[in-house]
Image: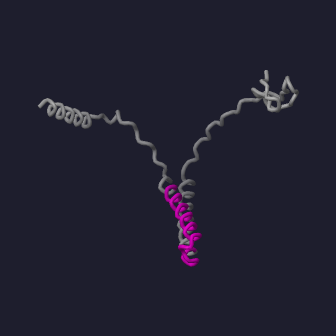
Amino acid sequence: MSLLFVVVLVVAATTIFTLFVRAKDVPPPEPVSPTRHLEERKATIYENLKDLQFEYRLGKLSDADYQQTKLTLQKELAAVLAEMEKIGAAEPVPAPTPARTQPKRAAAIDCPHCGAHFDHAMKFCGECGKAMA
């Protein structure tokens, strides 16, 4: 009887919690890219072209079927790319992010043991293998 009571209590608590979740507690949804569906379609077409070429090389398709299907897929791909370009041109260009600066390397250095010359500092000499100061 107590097990039944615990189960009913858990179900009731879960139901109440679910019904009373506040909208401000729910995280905002990710912004959806306007070209996401087109990018997925483009990837599918490229995969289909790859599969088509594989099946043609195996001899499963005749030359005429291969050429006709390939042409159809290429036309569809061209339409998708044109639509992506049209949408991309309408979107505002995002501000460029600042590029990470590469740390400056030390000037040329010579190995104190063998005298080998290197254009950047290293922990160990590339010639003799000894530790560099």
Residue plotted at (77% across, 24% down): 131
Residue 56 belongs to the span the image colors magenta = yes
Residue 90 in the image: x percent, y percent?
Answer: 54, 53
As displayed, is residue 72 above or below residue 15? Answer: below
User: On the image, which quarter does residue 103 sit in?
Assistant: top right
Tell me what residue is drawn at x 17 percent, y 34 percent.
8
Residue occupying the point 59% across, 70% down: 57
Question: Which residues lie in the magenta part?
Answer: 39-66
Name the residue nearer the viewer: 1 or 28.
1
x and y, in percent, of residue 23 in the image: 32, 36
Is residue 21 shown left or right of residue 78?
Answer: left
Q: Could you tell whether 6 is left or right of 128 in the image?
A: left
Is residue 11 left or right of 34 when viewed as pictured? left
Report the front residue among 5 and 97.
Answer: 5
Check the image and name the residue furthest to the top.
Answer: 133
Q: Quadrant of residue 58?
A: bottom right
Q: Position of residue 9 (x, y in %)?
A: 18, 32
**How far from the left and from the top, in percent, is residue 130?**
79, 25
The quadrant where residue 71 appears: bottom right
Number of dots carrying numbers = 0
Give the overall secondary structure of the magenta segment.
helix
